[in-house]
Image (cartoon, rainbow, N blue to C red):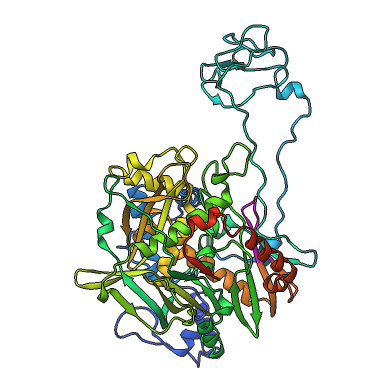
Amino acid sequence: SQKQKKKKIMEFANNHQITDLRINFNSEGWGPTSGERLAQLLEQVPYAHFDKKEKVGRTADFVFQQFQQQSQSQGSFISQKQMHYARKREEHLAAIGTTDFSYKHDAIEDSTFQLVDSTKLQSRNRRQNAPSGRFTGGGRGSGTSGGRVGMQTGRGGMLQQSDGFAAQGSLAKAGGILAGGRGISRGKHVLGRGFRKQDRKADRLPSLVVGGEWDMIEEFDLVHLLKLVANPPVIEDLAWHGHIDRYDDSYDKISTRIAKGLRRIDNKVFYDVTTSEDPILERLAVENVGDVYATDSIIAQLMAAPRSVYSWDIVVEKVNGIIFLDKREVSSFDYLTVSETAHEPPQATADMDEINHPDKLSMEATMINQNFTQQVLSDAEDSRKTYEVNPFFDEIESGVEPASAAYRYRKFTLGNVRLVARCELQSWITKHGEDVLMTCHALNEWDSKYSGGVNWRQKIDTQKGAVLATELKNNSCKLAKWTAQALLAGAQQLKLGYVSRVTPTNPYEHVVLGTQSFKPKDLAQQINLSINNIWGIVKMICELLLSKADGKYVLLKDPNKAIVRLYKVPLNTFEEEEEGNPAEDDEENEDKDDSENEISPIAAVNGPEIVK
Protein backbone atom coordinates (compact mmCIF):
# COMPACT_ATOMS: atom_id res chain seq x y z
CA SER A 1 0.00 0.00 0.00
CA GLN A 2 0.97 3.67 -0.16
CA LYS A 3 1.56 3.92 3.61
CA GLN A 4 3.90 0.91 3.60
CA LYS A 5 5.99 2.38 0.74
CA LYS A 6 6.27 5.71 2.58
CA LYS A 7 7.31 3.90 5.76
CA LYS A 8 10.07 2.00 3.95
CA ILE A 9 11.39 5.23 2.41
CA MET A 10 11.58 6.90 5.81
CA GLU A 11 13.39 3.89 7.30
CA PHE A 12 15.88 3.90 4.44
CA ALA A 13 16.49 7.64 4.85
CA ASN A 14 17.08 7.27 8.61
CA ASN A 15 19.53 4.40 8.12
CA HIS A 16 21.46 6.10 5.22
CA GLN A 17 21.99 9.68 6.26
CA ILE A 18 24.33 11.89 4.18
CA THR A 19 26.72 13.43 6.67
CA ASP A 20 29.45 14.96 4.43
CA LEU A 21 27.63 16.99 1.80
CA ARG A 22 29.54 20.12 0.73
CA ILE A 23 27.54 22.54 -1.38
CA ASN A 24 29.14 25.74 -2.61
CA PHE A 25 26.61 28.51 -3.19
CA ASN A 26 27.54 30.98 -5.92
CA SER A 27 26.15 34.33 -4.83
CA GLU A 28 27.56 36.26 -7.84
CA GLY A 29 26.14 34.15 -10.66
CA TRP A 30 25.47 30.59 -11.70
CA GLY A 31 27.76 27.58 -12.04
CA PRO A 32 30.40 26.13 -9.72
CA THR A 33 32.59 28.34 -7.59
CA SER A 34 36.35 28.22 -7.61
CA GLY A 35 38.10 26.03 -5.08
CA GLU A 36 40.94 23.57 -4.61
CA ARG A 37 38.74 20.53 -5.14
CA LEU A 38 37.33 21.95 -8.36
CA ALA A 39 40.82 22.83 -9.60
CA GLN A 40 41.98 19.26 -9.02
CA LEU A 41 39.02 17.83 -10.92
CA LEU A 42 39.40 20.13 -13.93
CA GLU A 43 43.18 20.40 -14.02
CA GLN A 44 43.69 17.95 -16.90
CA VAL A 45 40.55 18.91 -18.84
CA PRO A 46 41.35 21.04 -21.96
CA TYR A 47 39.30 24.19 -22.25
CA ALA A 48 38.80 26.73 -25.00
CA HIS A 49 36.60 29.77 -24.55
CA PHE A 50 33.70 30.05 -26.97
CA ASP A 51 31.60 33.11 -27.64
CA LYS A 52 28.54 33.04 -29.88
CA LYS A 53 29.52 36.40 -31.33
CA GLU A 54 32.82 35.03 -32.68
CA LYS A 55 32.83 33.94 -36.32
CA VAL A 56 34.81 30.75 -36.02
CA GLY A 57 33.70 29.36 -39.37
CA ARG A 58 32.37 25.91 -40.01
CA THR A 59 32.33 23.22 -37.36
CA ALA A 60 34.32 20.72 -39.43
CA ASP A 61 35.90 22.42 -42.45
CA PHE A 62 37.93 19.75 -44.20
CA VAL A 63 37.77 21.45 -47.59
CA PHE A 64 39.60 24.61 -46.52
CA GLN A 65 42.29 22.66 -44.72
CA GLN A 66 42.94 20.58 -47.81
CA PHE A 67 43.02 23.70 -50.00
CA GLN A 68 45.38 25.43 -47.57
CA GLN A 69 47.81 22.50 -47.63
CA GLN A 70 47.72 22.37 -51.43
CA SER A 71 48.27 26.12 -51.72
CA GLN A 72 51.25 26.04 -49.36
CA SER A 73 52.86 23.14 -51.19
CA GLN A 74 52.33 24.73 -54.62
CA GLY A 75 52.99 28.30 -53.49
CA SER A 76 49.91 29.92 -54.99
CA PHE A 77 47.95 32.99 -53.96
CA ILE A 78 44.59 32.70 -52.22
CA SER A 79 41.55 34.83 -52.88
CA GLN A 80 40.48 37.77 -50.73
CA LYS A 81 37.55 35.83 -49.27
CA GLN A 82 39.73 32.87 -48.38
CA MET A 83 42.40 35.20 -46.97
CA HIS A 84 39.77 36.92 -44.80
CA TYR A 85 38.50 33.57 -43.56
CA ALA A 86 42.04 32.38 -42.80
CA ARG A 87 42.81 35.61 -40.93
CA LYS A 88 39.68 35.18 -38.81
CA ARG A 89 40.75 31.67 -37.90
CA GLU A 90 44.23 32.90 -36.99
CA GLU A 91 42.76 35.63 -34.79
CA HIS A 92 40.46 33.13 -33.11
CA LEU A 93 43.31 30.74 -32.32
CA ALA A 94 45.34 33.63 -30.91
CA ALA A 95 42.39 34.88 -28.87
CA ILE A 96 41.57 31.60 -27.15
CA GLY A 97 45.24 31.14 -26.31
CA THR A 98 45.22 27.35 -26.52
CA THR A 99 46.16 24.66 -29.02
CA ASP A 100 44.96 21.67 -27.00
CA PHE A 101 42.50 20.72 -29.72
CA SER A 102 45.03 21.11 -32.57
CA TYR A 103 46.80 18.33 -34.41
CA LYS A 104 49.94 17.02 -32.73
CA HIS A 105 52.38 14.68 -34.41
CA ASP A 106 53.02 11.46 -32.50
CA ALA A 107 55.73 9.22 -33.93
CA ILE A 108 54.79 6.31 -31.62
CA GLU A 109 51.19 6.42 -32.77
CA ASP A 110 52.24 6.58 -36.43
CA SER A 111 54.40 3.48 -35.99
CA THR A 112 51.29 1.45 -35.03
CA PHE A 113 49.71 2.04 -38.45
CA GLN A 114 50.64 0.26 -41.63
CA LEU A 115 49.42 1.28 -45.05
CA VAL A 116 48.16 -1.47 -47.34
CA ASP A 117 48.69 -1.09 -51.08
CA SER A 118 45.20 -1.35 -52.60
CA THR A 119 46.11 -0.16 -56.09
CA LYS A 120 45.28 -2.42 -59.00
CA LEU A 121 48.14 -4.19 -60.68
CA GLN A 122 48.78 -3.00 -64.18
CA SER A 123 48.53 -5.59 -66.89
CA ARG A 124 51.73 -6.54 -68.65
CA ASN A 125 49.93 -7.01 -71.94
CA ARG A 126 51.20 -4.27 -74.21
CA ARG A 127 48.09 -4.45 -76.37
CA GLN A 128 46.05 -3.15 -73.45
CA ASN A 129 48.40 -0.25 -72.77
CA ALA A 130 49.03 0.96 -76.32
CA PRO A 131 47.09 0.58 -79.54
CA SER A 132 48.70 -1.65 -82.11
CA GLY A 133 48.80 -1.21 -85.84
CA ARG A 134 49.51 1.93 -87.80
CA PHE A 135 47.94 5.23 -86.95
CA THR A 136 45.97 7.16 -89.55
CA GLY A 137 45.48 10.84 -88.79
CA GLY A 138 42.04 12.37 -89.14
CA GLY A 139 40.22 9.04 -88.94
CA ARG A 140 37.65 7.83 -86.43
CA GLY A 141 40.07 5.56 -84.59
CA SER A 142 43.43 3.90 -84.52
CA GLY A 143 44.43 0.34 -85.15
CA THR A 144 42.43 -0.91 -82.14
CA SER A 145 38.73 -1.29 -81.67
CA GLY A 146 36.94 1.53 -79.93
CA GLY A 147 36.39 4.00 -82.72
CA ARG A 148 36.48 7.50 -81.26
CA VAL A 149 39.10 6.78 -78.64
CA GLY A 150 41.83 7.09 -81.26
CA MET A 151 44.23 10.05 -81.47
CA GLN A 152 44.57 12.82 -84.01
CA THR A 153 47.36 15.27 -84.68
CA GLY A 154 47.23 18.99 -85.13
CA ARG A 155 49.53 21.58 -86.65
CA GLY A 156 51.50 22.31 -83.51
CA GLY A 157 52.92 18.88 -82.92
CA MET A 158 50.32 18.08 -80.25
CA LEU A 159 48.67 14.72 -79.95
CA GLN A 160 44.99 15.41 -79.33
CA GLN A 161 42.46 12.87 -78.19
CA SER A 162 39.00 13.00 -79.69
CA ASP A 163 37.43 13.77 -76.31
CA GLY A 164 39.13 17.18 -76.13
CA PHE A 165 42.24 16.46 -74.02
CA ALA A 166 45.75 17.13 -75.32
CA ALA A 167 48.91 15.16 -74.68
CA GLN A 168 52.28 16.69 -75.38
CA GLY A 169 55.10 14.46 -76.44
CA SER A 170 58.34 14.45 -78.32
CA LEU A 171 57.93 11.30 -80.30
CA ALA A 172 54.59 9.54 -79.79
CA LYS A 173 55.81 6.06 -80.55
CA ALA A 174 53.84 3.21 -79.02
CA GLY A 175 53.06 0.03 -80.87
CA GLY A 176 53.77 1.50 -84.28
CA ILE A 177 52.62 5.14 -83.80
CA LEU A 178 54.82 7.94 -85.08
CA ALA A 179 53.57 11.55 -85.04
CA GLY A 180 54.87 14.53 -86.95
CA GLY A 181 54.61 18.28 -86.65
CA ARG A 182 51.99 18.94 -89.35
CA GLY A 183 50.29 15.59 -89.25
CA ILE A 184 50.77 11.98 -90.24
CA SER A 185 50.52 10.55 -93.70
CA ARG A 186 48.61 7.36 -94.25
CA GLY A 187 50.77 4.29 -94.13
CA LYS A 188 54.06 6.22 -93.70
CA HIS A 189 56.11 7.34 -90.72
CA VAL A 190 56.82 11.00 -91.31
CA LEU A 191 58.45 13.03 -88.56
CA GLY A 192 57.53 16.67 -89.07
CA ARG A 193 58.75 19.76 -87.31
CA GLY A 194 57.41 20.93 -83.98
CA PHE A 195 58.66 18.00 -81.90
CA ARG A 196 61.47 17.98 -79.38
CA LYS A 197 62.53 14.97 -77.45
CA GLN A 198 61.09 15.35 -73.97
CA ASP A 199 63.77 15.36 -71.33
CA ARG A 200 63.17 13.09 -68.44
CA LYS A 201 63.60 14.64 -65.03
CA ALA A 202 66.79 13.24 -63.56
CA ASP A 203 66.92 12.23 -59.93
CA ARG A 204 68.35 14.94 -57.73
CA LEU A 205 71.37 14.22 -55.57
CA PRO A 206 71.21 14.52 -51.77
CA SER A 207 73.04 17.32 -50.00
CA LEU A 208 75.22 14.69 -48.31
CA VAL A 209 75.77 10.96 -48.57
CA VAL A 210 74.30 8.83 -45.79
CA GLY A 211 77.05 6.87 -44.06
CA GLY A 212 76.90 3.18 -43.33
CA GLU A 213 77.16 3.80 -39.58
CA TRP A 214 74.19 6.14 -39.53
CA ASP A 215 71.05 4.95 -37.79
CA MET A 216 67.70 6.35 -38.93
CA ILE A 217 65.51 6.91 -35.88
CA GLU A 218 62.69 9.12 -37.20
CA GLU A 219 60.96 9.73 -40.52
CA PHE A 220 58.00 11.96 -41.29
CA ASP A 221 56.30 13.39 -44.37
CA LEU A 222 56.45 17.10 -45.02
CA VAL A 223 52.74 17.13 -45.80
CA HIS A 224 52.00 16.18 -42.20
CA LEU A 225 53.89 19.26 -41.01
CA LEU A 226 51.17 21.47 -42.50
CA LYS A 227 48.73 20.18 -39.87
CA LEU A 228 50.83 21.31 -36.91
CA VAL A 229 49.63 24.38 -34.98
CA ALA A 230 51.15 26.22 -32.03
CA ASN A 231 50.58 29.57 -30.39
CA PRO A 232 53.08 32.30 -31.28
CA PRO A 233 55.88 32.37 -28.67
CA VAL A 234 56.68 34.86 -25.98
CA ILE A 235 59.63 36.88 -27.33
CA GLU A 236 62.42 38.48 -25.30
CA ASP A 237 65.41 40.45 -26.64
CA LEU A 238 68.74 39.38 -25.14
CA ALA A 239 71.44 41.38 -26.97
CA TRP A 240 72.11 43.66 -29.97
CA HIS A 241 75.37 43.65 -31.93
CA GLY A 242 76.68 45.14 -35.16
CA HIS A 243 75.29 48.17 -37.00
CA ILE A 244 72.73 49.05 -39.68
CA ASP A 245 72.59 51.94 -42.15
CA ARG A 246 69.60 53.92 -43.36
CA TYR A 247 67.77 52.77 -46.47
CA ASP A 248 68.01 55.09 -49.47
CA ASP A 249 64.38 55.74 -50.41
CA SER A 250 65.37 56.89 -53.90
CA TYR A 251 65.33 53.22 -54.90
CA ASP A 252 61.55 53.20 -54.40
CA LYS A 253 61.24 55.43 -57.49
CA ILE A 254 63.14 53.10 -59.81
CA SER A 255 61.43 51.86 -62.97
CA THR A 256 62.53 50.22 -66.20
CA ARG A 257 63.12 53.65 -67.74
CA ILE A 258 65.40 54.84 -64.93
CA ALA A 259 66.92 51.53 -63.86
CA LYS A 260 70.13 51.52 -61.83
CA GLY A 261 73.01 49.20 -62.46
CA LEU A 262 73.96 46.77 -59.73
CA ARG A 263 77.41 47.54 -58.36
CA ARG A 264 79.97 45.19 -56.91
CA ILE A 265 80.62 45.88 -53.23
CA ASP A 266 84.29 45.01 -52.71
CA ASN A 267 85.01 46.63 -49.35
CA LYS A 268 82.51 44.80 -47.15
CA VAL A 269 82.60 41.38 -45.56
CA PHE A 270 79.54 39.19 -44.92
CA TYR A 271 79.45 36.77 -41.99
CA ASP A 272 77.38 33.60 -42.01
CA VAL A 273 78.74 32.02 -38.85
CA THR A 274 77.11 28.82 -37.70
CA THR A 275 75.50 28.39 -34.28
CA SER A 276 78.24 26.56 -32.40
CA GLU A 277 80.89 29.10 -33.48
CA ASP A 278 78.94 32.16 -32.35
CA PRO A 279 80.58 33.56 -29.18
CA ILE A 280 77.39 35.29 -28.04
CA LEU A 281 75.31 32.12 -28.34
CA GLU A 282 78.08 30.23 -26.56
CA ARG A 283 77.95 32.68 -23.65
CA LEU A 284 74.16 32.45 -23.47
CA ALA A 285 74.38 28.65 -23.45
CA VAL A 286 76.79 28.76 -20.51
CA GLU A 287 74.30 30.98 -18.68
CA ASN A 288 71.56 28.39 -19.43
CA VAL A 289 69.28 30.93 -21.08
CA GLY A 290 67.65 28.44 -23.46
CA ASP A 291 67.27 24.81 -24.41
CA VAL A 292 67.75 25.06 -28.20
CA TYR A 293 70.18 27.40 -30.00
CA ALA A 294 70.11 28.21 -33.73
CA THR A 295 70.36 30.98 -36.32
CA ASP A 296 67.46 32.58 -38.14
CA SER A 297 68.41 30.94 -41.44
CA ILE A 298 68.27 27.46 -39.89
CA ILE A 299 64.93 28.10 -38.18
CA ALA A 300 63.53 29.61 -41.39
CA GLN A 301 64.57 26.47 -43.26
CA LEU A 302 62.55 24.37 -40.83
CA MET A 303 59.58 26.73 -41.10
CA ALA A 304 59.59 26.54 -44.90
CA ALA A 305 60.36 22.81 -45.01
CA PRO A 306 56.94 21.82 -46.48
CA ARG A 307 57.70 23.96 -49.55
CA SER A 308 61.25 22.74 -50.10
CA VAL A 309 62.11 20.58 -53.10
CA TYR A 310 65.89 20.38 -53.04
CA SER A 311 67.75 18.38 -50.45
CA TRP A 312 69.08 20.10 -47.32
CA ASP A 313 70.59 18.98 -44.03
CA ILE A 314 70.99 20.33 -40.51
CA VAL A 315 73.50 18.99 -37.98
CA VAL A 316 72.13 18.59 -34.46
CA GLU A 317 74.43 18.34 -31.43
CA LYS A 318 72.96 17.67 -28.02
CA VAL A 319 75.29 18.17 -25.06
CA ASN A 320 74.07 17.98 -21.46
CA GLY A 321 70.48 18.44 -22.61
CA ILE A 322 71.29 21.57 -24.67
CA ILE A 323 70.73 21.42 -28.44
CA PHE A 324 72.72 23.27 -31.12
CA LEU A 325 71.35 23.37 -34.66
CA ASP A 326 74.30 23.81 -37.03
CA LYS A 327 75.11 23.80 -40.71
CA ARG A 328 78.04 21.88 -42.12
CA GLU A 329 81.28 23.63 -42.94
CA VAL A 330 81.29 22.32 -46.51
CA SER A 331 77.70 22.82 -47.66
CA SER A 332 75.57 25.03 -49.86
CA PHE A 333 73.16 25.92 -47.07
CA ASP A 334 73.74 29.69 -47.34
CA TYR A 335 73.37 29.82 -51.12
CA LEU A 336 70.01 30.84 -52.52
CA THR A 337 68.07 28.50 -54.75
CA VAL A 338 66.71 29.55 -58.14
CA SER A 339 63.36 28.30 -59.49
CA GLU A 340 63.31 25.55 -56.89
CA THR A 341 59.52 25.10 -56.93
CA ALA A 342 59.04 25.74 -60.66
CA HIS A 343 57.27 23.21 -62.83
CA GLU A 344 60.52 22.68 -64.73
CA PRO A 345 63.42 23.75 -62.51
CA PRO A 346 66.82 24.33 -64.15
CA GLN A 347 68.74 21.11 -64.69
CA ALA A 348 72.28 20.29 -65.69
CA THR A 349 71.53 19.02 -69.21
CA ALA A 350 73.36 19.21 -72.49
CA ASP A 351 70.81 21.64 -73.92
CA MET A 352 71.17 24.06 -71.02
CA ASP A 353 73.84 26.74 -71.28
CA GLU A 354 76.71 26.58 -68.84
CA ILE A 355 75.82 29.96 -67.37
CA ASN A 356 72.34 28.60 -66.50
CA HIS A 357 73.65 25.59 -64.62
CA PRO A 358 71.81 25.24 -61.27
CA ASP A 359 75.02 25.74 -59.28
CA LYS A 360 75.99 28.83 -61.29
CA LEU A 361 72.48 30.27 -60.89
CA SER A 362 72.63 29.70 -57.14
CA MET A 363 75.98 31.47 -56.91
CA GLU A 364 74.70 34.34 -59.06
CA ALA A 365 71.53 34.81 -56.98
CA THR A 366 73.48 34.82 -53.71
CA MET A 367 75.91 37.48 -54.86
CA ILE A 368 73.12 39.61 -56.32
CA ASN A 369 71.29 39.47 -53.01
CA GLN A 370 74.37 40.52 -51.04
CA ASN A 371 75.29 43.37 -53.39
CA PHE A 372 71.72 44.66 -53.44
CA THR A 373 71.41 44.80 -49.63
CA GLN A 374 74.48 47.07 -49.45
CA GLN A 375 73.85 49.21 -52.52
CA VAL A 376 70.43 50.45 -51.37
CA LEU A 377 71.93 52.01 -48.21
CA SER A 378 72.50 55.72 -47.67
CA ASP A 379 75.99 57.24 -47.35
CA ALA A 380 74.94 60.10 -45.06
CA GLU A 381 76.89 60.61 -41.83
CA ASP A 382 73.87 60.33 -39.54
CA SER A 383 72.46 57.24 -41.24
CA ARG A 384 74.12 54.58 -39.08
CA LYS A 385 72.73 52.92 -35.96
CA THR A 386 75.48 51.33 -33.91
CA TYR A 387 75.02 48.65 -31.26
CA GLU A 388 77.50 46.46 -29.41
CA VAL A 389 80.68 45.49 -31.24
CA ASN A 390 80.38 43.02 -34.10
CA PRO A 391 81.42 39.66 -32.62
CA PHE A 392 82.76 38.33 -35.93
CA PHE A 393 84.75 41.28 -37.31
CA ASP A 394 88.52 41.30 -36.96
CA GLU A 395 89.85 44.86 -36.78
CA ILE A 396 93.23 43.69 -38.08
CA GLU A 397 91.72 43.42 -41.55
CA SER A 398 92.56 46.60 -43.44
CA GLY A 399 90.58 48.18 -46.22
CA VAL A 400 87.35 46.33 -45.45
CA GLU A 401 84.47 46.75 -43.02
CA PRO A 402 81.62 44.49 -41.94
CA ALA A 403 78.47 44.67 -44.01
CA SER A 404 75.47 46.52 -42.65
CA ALA A 405 73.85 43.96 -40.37
CA ALA A 406 72.42 44.13 -36.86
CA TYR A 407 72.51 40.82 -34.99
CA ARG A 408 69.50 40.61 -32.73
CA TYR A 409 69.67 37.77 -30.21
CA ARG A 410 66.18 36.77 -29.09
CA LYS A 411 64.59 34.11 -26.90
CA PHE A 412 61.35 32.48 -28.05
CA THR A 413 59.39 30.61 -25.38
CA LEU A 414 57.16 27.92 -26.89
CA GLY A 415 55.54 26.26 -23.91
CA ASN A 416 58.30 24.22 -22.30
CA VAL A 417 60.75 24.92 -25.13
CA ARG A 418 63.15 27.86 -24.86
CA LEU A 419 64.59 28.71 -28.27
CA VAL A 420 67.47 31.21 -28.55
CA ALA A 421 68.28 32.49 -32.04
CA ARG A 422 70.53 35.02 -33.73
CA CYS A 423 68.41 37.10 -36.09
CA GLU A 424 69.63 39.59 -38.67
CA LEU A 425 68.42 42.98 -39.90
CA GLN A 426 69.91 44.87 -42.86
CA SER A 427 68.69 48.48 -42.67
CA TRP A 428 66.22 50.96 -41.21
CA ILE A 429 64.09 53.87 -42.38
CA THR A 430 62.04 56.62 -40.78
CA LYS A 431 58.28 56.58 -41.43
CA HIS A 432 55.77 58.87 -39.76
CA GLY A 433 58.42 60.01 -37.31
CA GLU A 434 59.31 56.48 -36.16
CA ASP A 435 62.30 54.29 -36.99
CA VAL A 436 61.29 51.15 -38.87
CA LEU A 437 63.59 48.11 -38.97
CA MET A 438 63.94 46.37 -42.34
CA THR A 439 65.22 43.25 -44.01
CA CYS A 440 66.27 43.46 -47.67
CA HIS A 441 66.37 40.74 -50.31
CA ALA A 442 66.60 40.58 -54.09
CA LEU A 443 64.78 38.44 -56.65
CA ASN A 444 66.67 37.95 -59.89
CA GLU A 445 65.57 37.28 -63.46
CA TRP A 446 67.99 35.06 -65.35
CA ASP A 447 66.12 34.04 -68.52
CA SER A 448 62.39 34.55 -68.95
CA LYS A 449 62.17 31.72 -71.48
CA TYR A 450 63.09 29.19 -68.81
CA SER A 451 61.71 30.89 -65.70
CA GLY A 452 57.97 31.22 -66.24
CA GLY A 453 57.79 33.18 -69.48
CA VAL A 454 57.14 36.56 -67.81
CA ASN A 455 59.44 39.30 -69.10
CA TRP A 456 60.08 41.67 -66.20
CA ARG A 457 60.85 44.67 -68.38
CA GLN A 458 57.39 44.45 -69.94
CA LYS A 459 55.37 43.71 -66.79
CA ILE A 460 57.11 45.14 -63.74
CA ASP A 461 56.00 48.76 -64.14
CA THR A 462 52.31 48.05 -64.73
CA GLN A 463 51.75 44.50 -63.43
CA LYS A 464 54.14 44.00 -60.54
CA GLY A 465 51.66 41.62 -58.92
CA ALA A 466 51.92 39.26 -61.90
CA VAL A 467 55.70 39.24 -61.57
CA LEU A 468 55.46 38.48 -57.85
CA ALA A 469 52.91 35.73 -58.48
CA THR A 470 55.26 34.09 -60.97
CA GLU A 471 58.14 34.33 -58.51
CA LEU A 472 55.97 32.84 -55.79
CA LYS A 473 55.23 29.89 -58.04
CA ASN A 474 58.88 29.41 -58.98
CA ASN A 475 60.54 30.39 -55.68
CA SER A 476 57.91 29.63 -53.06
CA CYS A 477 60.39 28.15 -50.58
CA LYS A 478 62.84 31.06 -50.88
CA LEU A 479 60.13 33.69 -50.33
CA ALA A 480 58.75 31.74 -47.36
CA LYS A 481 62.21 31.64 -45.76
CA TRP A 482 62.70 35.38 -46.24
CA THR A 483 59.30 36.06 -44.70
CA ALA A 484 60.07 33.77 -41.76
CA GLN A 485 63.42 35.48 -41.18
CA ALA A 486 61.72 38.88 -41.12
CA LEU A 487 59.19 37.61 -38.56
CA LEU A 488 61.95 36.11 -36.42
CA ALA A 489 63.97 39.34 -36.45
CA GLY A 490 60.94 41.47 -35.57
CA ALA A 491 61.26 43.59 -38.73
CA GLN A 492 58.41 45.98 -39.47
CA GLN A 493 59.13 45.98 -43.21
CA LEU A 494 60.50 43.61 -45.82
CA LYS A 495 62.02 45.15 -48.94
CA LEU A 496 62.14 43.13 -52.16
CA GLY A 497 64.29 44.19 -55.09
CA TYR A 498 63.81 43.04 -58.68
CA VAL A 499 67.19 42.56 -60.37
CA SER A 500 67.61 41.35 -63.94
CA ARG A 501 70.48 40.58 -66.24
CA VAL A 502 71.44 43.24 -68.75
CA THR A 503 71.15 40.55 -71.39
CA PRO A 504 69.99 36.95 -70.81
CA THR A 505 73.39 35.63 -71.90
CA ASN A 506 75.43 37.85 -69.55
CA PRO A 507 75.38 36.62 -65.93
CA TYR A 508 77.94 39.18 -64.75
CA GLU A 509 76.09 42.51 -65.27
CA HIS A 510 72.72 43.30 -63.72
CA VAL A 511 70.31 46.20 -63.28
CA VAL A 512 67.76 47.00 -60.56
CA LEU A 513 64.34 47.34 -62.23
CA GLY A 514 62.23 48.11 -59.16
CA THR A 515 61.52 47.54 -55.49
CA GLN A 516 58.50 46.62 -53.41
CA SER A 517 57.77 46.86 -49.69
CA PHE A 518 55.70 44.54 -47.51
CA LYS A 519 54.79 44.11 -43.91
CA PRO A 520 56.01 40.62 -42.97
CA LYS A 521 52.68 39.54 -41.50
CA ASP A 522 50.75 40.79 -44.54
CA LEU A 523 53.15 39.05 -46.90
CA ALA A 524 52.81 35.84 -44.89
CA GLN A 525 49.04 35.94 -45.44
CA GLN A 526 49.43 36.68 -49.15
CA ILE A 527 51.76 33.72 -49.72
CA ASN A 528 49.59 31.52 -47.47
CA LEU A 529 52.23 31.09 -44.76
CA SER A 530 50.41 30.38 -41.49
CA ILE A 531 52.19 31.83 -38.45
CA ASN A 532 50.65 29.24 -36.14
CA ASN A 533 51.74 26.48 -38.49
CA ILE A 534 55.40 27.53 -38.78
CA TRP A 535 55.72 27.75 -35.02
CA GLY A 536 54.00 24.38 -34.72
CA ILE A 537 56.70 22.89 -36.97
CA VAL A 538 59.51 24.40 -34.90
CA LYS A 539 57.95 23.30 -31.62
CA MET A 540 57.42 19.73 -32.83
CA ILE A 541 61.01 19.36 -34.05
CA CYS A 542 62.45 20.91 -30.88
CA GLU A 543 60.39 18.62 -28.65
CA LEU A 544 61.43 15.64 -30.77
CA LEU A 545 65.12 16.49 -30.40
CA LEU A 546 64.81 17.23 -26.67
CA SER A 547 63.36 13.75 -26.15
CA LYS A 548 66.50 12.11 -27.61
CA ALA A 549 69.68 11.21 -25.74
CA ASP A 550 72.86 13.28 -25.93
CA GLY A 551 74.82 12.83 -29.15
CA LYS A 552 75.03 14.00 -32.74
CA TYR A 553 72.16 13.81 -35.22
CA VAL A 554 71.50 14.85 -38.81
CA LEU A 555 68.17 16.10 -40.13
CA LEU A 556 68.15 15.31 -43.87
CA LYS A 557 65.57 16.15 -46.53
CA ASP A 558 65.16 13.47 -49.18
CA PRO A 559 66.16 14.90 -52.60
CA ASN A 560 63.33 13.23 -54.55
CA LYS A 561 60.55 12.76 -51.97
CA ALA A 562 58.76 15.06 -49.53
CA ILE A 563 60.27 13.21 -46.57
CA VAL A 564 62.59 14.31 -43.77
CA ARG A 565 64.65 11.75 -41.87
CA LEU A 566 66.50 12.04 -38.58
CA TYR A 567 69.74 10.06 -38.33
CA LYS A 568 71.90 9.36 -35.31
CA VAL A 569 75.53 9.63 -36.39
CA PRO A 570 78.90 9.06 -34.68
CA LEU A 571 80.38 11.97 -32.79
CA ASN A 572 83.36 12.33 -35.13
CA THR A 573 81.16 12.74 -38.23
CA PHE A 574 82.07 15.78 -40.41
CA GLU A 575 85.26 16.48 -38.47
CA GLU A 576 87.39 15.55 -41.47
CA GLU A 577 85.49 18.08 -43.61
CA GLU A 578 86.16 20.85 -41.10
CA GLU A 579 89.85 20.04 -40.68
CA GLY A 580 90.44 19.62 -44.43
CA ASN A 581 93.14 17.74 -46.27
CA PRO A 582 96.58 19.45 -46.31
CA ALA A 583 97.52 17.75 -49.58
CA GLU A 584 94.41 19.07 -51.28
CA ASP A 585 95.10 22.55 -49.89
CA ASP A 586 98.60 22.53 -51.43
CA GLU A 587 97.21 21.48 -54.79
CA GLU A 588 94.60 24.22 -54.62
CA ASN A 589 97.31 26.83 -53.87
CA GLU A 590 99.36 25.65 -56.88
CA ASP A 591 96.31 25.83 -59.13
CA LYS A 592 95.59 29.28 -57.78
CA ASP A 593 99.08 30.50 -58.68
CA ASP A 594 98.78 29.08 -62.19
CA SER A 595 95.40 30.70 -62.82
CA GLU A 596 96.17 34.01 -61.14
CA ASN A 597 95.72 36.02 -64.32
CA GLU A 598 92.49 34.30 -65.37
CA ILE A 599 89.10 35.84 -64.67
CA SER A 600 86.77 33.30 -63.10
CA PRO A 601 83.00 33.59 -63.46
CA ILE A 602 82.58 33.53 -59.68
CA ALA A 603 84.98 36.41 -59.13
CA ALA A 604 83.24 38.43 -61.80
CA VAL A 605 79.91 38.04 -60.04
CA ASN A 606 80.54 38.10 -56.32
CA GLY A 607 82.66 41.06 -55.27
CA PRO A 608 82.10 40.83 -51.49
CA GLU A 609 83.75 38.20 -49.37
CA ILE A 610 81.80 35.55 -47.49
CA VAL A 611 83.00 34.32 -44.12
CA LYS A 612 81.36 31.21 -42.69
The range drawn in magenta is 555-566
The percent coordinates of residue 479 (x first, y second) are 44, 56
- In the image, taking residue 15 as reference, residue 68 lies left or right, namely left
Q: Position of residue 460 (x, y in %)?
A: 32, 44
Residue in the picture at 30% in, 66% down: 247
Give the residue drawn at x 47%, y 65%: 608
Q: Position of residue 114 (x, y in %)?
A: 72, 55
Q: Position of residue 612 (x, y in %)?
A: 55, 71
From this view, report whether residue 579 is shown above or below residue 247: below
Q: Does 550 sit left or right of 4 as displayed?
A: right
Determine the image quadrant of residue 504: top left
**How many labels were placed on the picture?**
0
Is 192 located above or below residue 415 in the figure? Answer: above
The correct choice, above or below, for 24 with respect to 140 in the image is: below
Res. 49 visible in picture: no
- Nearest to the observer: residue 378 or residue 541: 378
For this orientation, the residue located farthest to the bottom is 19
Residue that lies at the very extreme toward the top in this rendered image: 186
Q: Nearer the viewer, residue 417 or 385?
A: 385
The relative height of residue 568 versus residue 482 in the rendered view (above or below) is: below
Quadrant in the picture for residue 423: bottom left
Instruction: State yes or no: residue 311 in magenta.
Output: no
Residue 379 visible to an observer of this rendering: yes
